[in-house]
Every structure is written in structure tokens, then in C-alpha cells.
Amino acid sequence: MNITPGPLLGNIQTPADLRKLSKEQLHEVSEELRQFIIDMVSVHGGHFAASLGVVELSVALHYVFNTPYDQLVWDVGHQAYGHKILTGRRDVFHTNRKYHGISGFPKRDESPYDTFGVGHSSTSLSAALGMAIASKFKGETDRQHIAVIGDGAMTAGMAFEALNHAGVANANVLFILNDNCMSIDPNVGALKEYLTDITTSPTYNKFRDDVWNLLGKLPVGKRFTRDMASKLEAGIKGVVSGSSNLFESLKLRYFGPIDGHNIIKLVDTLQDLKDIPGPKLLHIVTTKGKGYALAEKDQTTWHAPGLFDKITGEIFKKIPDKPQAPKYQDVFGHTIIELAEQNNTIMGITPAMPSGSSLKYMMEKMPDRAFDVGICEQHAVTLSAGLATQGMRVFCTIYSSFFQRAYDQALHDVAIQKLPVVFCLDRAGLVGEDGPTHHGVYDIAYMRCVPNVVISSPMNEEELRNLMYSSQLSTQQQPFVIRYPRGQGVMPEWRQPFKEIKIGTGRKLRSGKDIAILSLGHVGNFVTEACKDLLADDLQPAHYDMRFVKPLDEEMLHEVFSQFDKVITVEDHAISGGFGSAVMEFMVDHGYTAKVKRLGIPDRIIEHGKPEELHRECGFDAAGIAAAAREMMKDKVTVTAI
Ligand SMILES: Cc1ncc(C[n+]2csc(CCOP(=O)(O)OP(=O)(O)O)c2C)c(N)n1
Ligand SMILES: CC(=O)[C@@H](O)[C@H](O)COP(=O)(O)O
Ligand SMILES: [Mg+2]
């Protein structure tokens, strides 16, 4: 479908074109940009509501600042579609998040306007501060550094670490806090309440009006002098004394709150702030999903809705012709409730992903036992550890790639103390369109070296339920990782009675004689397919679903290496340090020799695309596994590990 930009947007290739327009034309540009985002995302998919909320901000920033010389960092980057469209990528925007297309997040090698690669939240303040300190060191006194951070991202420890430094770093940095009261789900925590207080407080609103009156009196052009800045500062002090301002207390000059959809106000304010040196924070208030009524109303659904009819707002769902297997996240979400009904020590924790992880079902049903703690993976893990010291059996559900944030906490606070926290690592493996920042492909490697930890992965829904069941039994007294992928499993009839799985035991799914294929997790289903293909050629593969990487099923591995001289391991994880590596270590440690081929993610960054495209690229889809098996059976060398 051909999507044409409006007449003003159609003439903007780069921000230099935008800057040729009058301030009065920016409202029209914003409307065209908003419409272009709606047109594109409805047809091509991607994140939606967050970009709509910062349309005016995106236009104002590129209008006022001399980007890319002035450096602009977007936090998370899921809201940067307007930025991408204004900075040279309008005509390729239909490739957004597609295989070999542009990335859904700012990315340094994609454009000089993308000053910092993002995807995980709360990095923007540190990155922009680093850039500002470097500019100061290099004597680039005219250079501006701006970070745009959401109220959700602001809840993370990293953001506060940066604020703490920025207040004393004496560098030229502007932090823009985009406050829309939303994370993916409604934002949570005391900071959110504090921001709401500021936004609704009559004292602050009076202050804001005073600032506007002051600015209004200034001559056009160089609107803001140092003299005015110090008057304003005195004004701020007057207003905030007695009702201390968090950001002022941290030695940042605080401005706002202002309406982030008023393009003229935004432009004027940014112009003024340009002339105020040092660390500043501008608080803007916006509506997530602005300009698309359904998105404004149900901001969580429209965070990333999938394809939709932009006129009716109908979100397209495939109509299944037969009963569908559920998503793994939903199996988790319903199973934890069943378990919690039987075991009253169970609690559920999610750092900011109640919908994504499906912990929301338990949060609704058992609000005193399941919590969203905001974007704060580190806190979520140590909080779980604290709860575990008191006898609670916590299921801490975190996306695999976000769990990277909490490595020290998992090691120092959980594993060393041998606390029986269950880590449900959702989105483990290649996640697809979100790309390299979100692929959860390192968790086995970084957890496998940690003592006391059980690491498991289910091949289907029933296995996930049984692993969850086994992880909370009183006989189980150590940290327990269960990793499972994004999306659907394979069993429409998934709600089977619980069965205990003995820790460190795998399953032999088929016997064979020519080659043994060992898999971990959902990719075992690809192996099942590959085996069918091989059988058609009269080849006899054996298939073992190992279920655990740690501890490995040693009895099963002795069987494998004593019976087979050709072995393939398959995992949706980095080959380096992963499941296959663990199997090879076992082989070497026990003096076996076999030809082993490890299939998984090679030692390079895998970009975005559909999961099937990425599995194919990495060679562990069913066809890739069958091809590797055939290749090994052609090769008669039997003693060298490759
Ligand atoms: C470390 C980390 N945890 C969780 C996420 C998932 N995530 C992406 S956007 C988002 C909400 C961010 O809220 P906010 O910063 O307020 O931006 P908004 O969507 O409201 O514009 C979350 C939780 C992430 N990207 N990174
Ligand atoms: C930007 C971000 O981090 C999230 O919005 C992420 O894209 C969600 O991923 P899922 O769609 O897998 O929940
Ligand atoms: Mg927000």
C-alpha cells in the first residue's frame, strides 16, 4: 500500500528542511507526522501510542536544536518513530522492524541522528550526560545534549544514578521528562504519585504561569538572558521552598510542567532553555496515544497493537481454523494462580511487564500476592530474595534480556545465599521484530557458571506447568530458572494435571541409531519436524529433550555418548557458553569423543525480523536441523569435536 505524507512532511527530508518553516506551520507538520505514523503502523506494525504522544516534542526538538550536532538521546526508543521520519527515514519507514529493514529503535549505525543505541529503558540520562561531559572536555561550549525519558523509565535505578551525577557534573545537559502517567501498563510507585502531585498542584501551576509571564515579556530572538535565568532561579527557589522539588534538590534546574502537545509553547521553552547552561530538567505532560481516540482510551493495548484498520480501529487477529495453543506467557499467568491457590507462600513479581508476562491475572485475583514494581529489574530480584528469606516462594517473572540488568542481584543476593527464588525468564531466545536489544539469548551462559542454580526450559505448555510445579515444592531449595520463548506453544490442551519433574532429568522422545539430536526448550518442536524429514530418507535420528542445562541429565548423556558418535545440540541461545557448550564440557570431562555440531545463535549480533526468518538465518529451524544432520551423516570423521 502506498502511503503518502502530507504536503509539508513530504518536503522534509532532514531537520534542515523543517527549520525552513515558520513556527506557525509546525502545528500542521505535527498533524501530518501523526497521520503518517498512524498510516504506517496500522499497515506495517510496531510500537504506536508512545510515538503519537511525542509528535509535537519530536518536531519541536528538531526545529529548535541543531541536530545531529546537538545530540538527542531517546530513552527506550519505542517512541522515536517521529524522530526517524523527520531524520531521513521517511521513505524507508515501511521497512520498520522488518527483516533487513530499519530498526524499531534508534541505532547508531543507522543514522547520525541516532546518537545512542537504545531498547532497554533508562539509559538516556547517563548517555547524554556522558556526551555532555565529553563536549565540555573538548571545548564544544555551543553543543547541546538532550535526553528524552518517560515517567516509566524514570523509575529505574539507572535514571536516578544519572540524576545524582548530573547535578554536580556542571555539564550542559537537558533532560526532558515525558510524563504521560503510563509505562506499558499504568505506571506505578511513589515517583508517579509525586509527578502527579506536581502536575496538579496549584503552587506549581502558579509557578508555571509566572514563568510563562516572565518569558512572554522577553524580546523575540535571544529570549532568555543570564539575568533572566537568575531571576527565574530565584523564582523557582521561592516557589519550591516549603514544597521541595525532587529535581531541584538534586541540583538540576527544574522547568514545567508544561503541555507537551502545545507546539508553540514547546518551541519557545526549548529556545529559552538552550540559553541556560548546566543541568536542567523540563517536565512535559503528554497523553500516550494522542490523536488516535482508541489509543488514548486504552493505552496498554495500543502500546504495540499489531496491524489494525485505522478507520474502524479493529485490531486484526488471525481467525484460527482449529483450537490454538496458548502463549507461553499465558500458561505462566494462569498456572501461577493455580499453584498459589495450593501454596500460600507463593508470590509473583514483575518489573513493569504485567501484561507482557501475564502476571496481571494474578495481580487482579490476588492483589496482595502479586506486584508490578516498575521498571527496576535489580530491585525486583533483590526484593524477591528478601521475600524468600521470610519463607515466601517468589516467582519473579522477567524478560530474559531485561534480566541481564539484574545479574549481580541474581548472583549476590539469590544464588550465593541459595534462596529458592523462581526466575521465569520470558522472551528467552530470538524475540523477532524488537531485534538485538531484546533477544534473550545470553541467560544460559551467564547463569550456568553460577553455583546453586537450576536452569531449565520447557518444550511445551505442559512441561512449563510441570517445571513451575516442581520449582515450588518444599524439597526444592535453590534458585530455579525456567526459560521460555515469546509467543505460542504447541498444545491447545495445555491444562493437564501437574506432575513432578525430577530436577536434572531429560526425556527421550525417540530412539534412533544414526545420530542423536539433543534439544533444550521449545526448539525441540523443530527437532521433531526435522526428524520426520530425516525418517523419510530412511535416516534414524534419536531425539532427547534434555529439559535442564543445569544440572545436566548425566545418565542420559552417558547413554548418548556411549551409543552415538554423531551428536547435534539445538538451542535458542548463543552457542558460546550455552546448552551445547555444556554438553561438550560433559563429553570432554568424561573422555568421550564424538562429532558434535552445536546449532544455536552464532557469535554475532542477530538483527530483527520475524522469528522464523531469524531461526532460518541461524540454521536451527526444522530445515536447518535436518540439513545439519544430513551433512554430518555424509561426513565419516568420528573423533573430532567441531
Ligand atoms: C530495562 C527495561 N525494562 C523493561 C522494558 C520494557 N518497556 C519498554 S517501554 C516500557 C514503558 C516505558 O514507559 P515510559 O518510559 O513512561 O514511556 P512511554 O511508553 O510512556 O512513552 C517498558 C516497561 C524495557 N524496554 N527495558
Ligand atoms: C519497547 C519494549 O521494550 C517493549 O514494548 C517490548 O517491545 C515488548 O515486547 P513484547 O511485545 O514481547 O511484550
Ligand atoms: Mg510514560
Image (cartoon, rainbow, N blue to C red):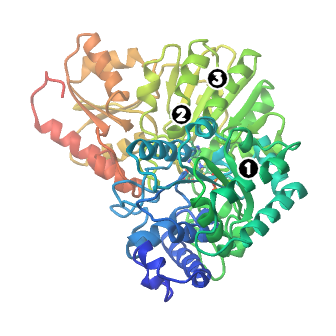
**What is the crowding at mark 3: few (fewer than 14 residues within 10 Å), some, or many (at least 20)?**
many
| Dot 3 amino acid type | Val
**What is the crowding at mark 2: few (fewer than 14 residues within 10 Å), some, or many (at least 20)?**
some
SS class, disc 3: loop
Residue 571 found in image quarter: top left
Circle 3 sits on which residue?
421
Residue 540 vertical position relative to residue 286 in the rendered view, above or below: above
Q: Is residue 94 visible?
A: no
Q: Which mark is residue 187?
A: 1
Spot the residue most to the bottom: 7
Could you tell me residue 15's position as x and y percent? 44, 72
Q: Earlier in the sequence, mark 3 or mark 1?
A: 1
Of 393 and 471, nearer the camera is 393
Residue 605 vertical position relative to residue 499 in the rendered view, above or below: below
Q: How many marks?
A: 3
Check the picture and name the quadrant holding the C terminus: top left
| Dot 2 amino acid type | Arg
Q: Is residue 531 visible?
A: yes
Of 202 and 607, nearer the camera is 202
Q: Would the CB of label 1 be found within 8 Å of ligand 3?
A: yes
| Foreground label between 3 and 1 | 1
Of 412 and 489, nearer the camera is 412
